[in-house]
Amino acid sequence: VQLVESGGGLVQPGGSLRLSCAASGTRFRFHSMSWHRQGPGEERELVAGMIGDSIRRYADSVKGRFTISRDSTKNTVYLQMNSLKPEDTAVYYCRGTIGTNDYWGQGTQVTVSS
C-alpha cells in the first residue's frame, strides 16, 4: 500500500493551499484517513482526521481555517488550508488505516513565508 501526497509548496501568510493524498496498492477502503504535520524540531501532530465519510476532527490550531475531505471511492483525502500562518510551516503527512494497519506517505513540505 502506498500513499502519495501532493500540493505542498511556498505560500505567503494569509494564502491557501490544497493538499491531496492518493492511495494505491489496495482494494480495501481506508477506515480512517488523516493529515499530520511535523515542524522543525517538533513532534509530529494530528492536524485533521476523518473516520468514515462524515466524522471529522481538527487540531484547535487549525479549526476554522483547514477543511478535510475525502473521496472514499478513490481512497483519496484532501486538506484545504486557508488563512495560512508562518506557524503552519511543516512537512505534512497523510495517514490511512485499514483494520489495525497504519500507512503513511512520505510527506509534502508546506512553507508559509513572506
Image (spheres, rainbow, N blue to C red):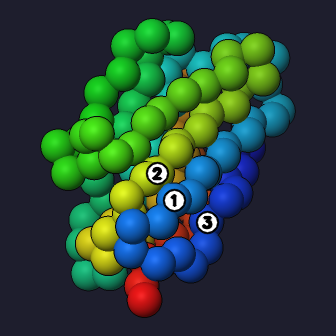
Q: Identify residue type, mark 1.
A: Ser
Residue extending farthest to the front is 14
> Is residue 76 something that shows in the picture?
yes
- Closer to us: 62 or 106: 62
Residue extending farthest to the bottom is 114
Q: Is residue 112 above or below residue 1?
A: below
- Report how far apart the C-alphas of labels 1 and 3 lie in the structure: 10 Å
Q: Identify residue type, mark 3.
A: Gly
Q: Which residue is mark 2?
A: 81
Pair 1/3: label in front: 1
> Is residue 46 something that shows in the picture?
no
Determine which quarter of the picture holds residue 108.
bottom right
Pair 2/3: label in front: 2
Contact between labelled residues 2 and 1, with CB atoms less than 8 Å apart: yes
Picture coordinates of residue 65, whole percent (x, y):
34, 46
Q: Is residue 111 above or below residue 98?
A: below
Q: Image point 52% across, 43% down: which residue? A: 79
Picture coordinates of residue 87, whole percent (x, y):
27, 72
Q: Which residue is mark 3?
A: 8
Q: Identify residue type, mark 2.
A: Met
- Report how far apart the C-alphas of labels 2 and 3 lie in the structure: 10 Å
Q: Earlier in the sequence, mark 1 or mark 2?
A: 1
Q: Which residue is mark 1?
A: 16
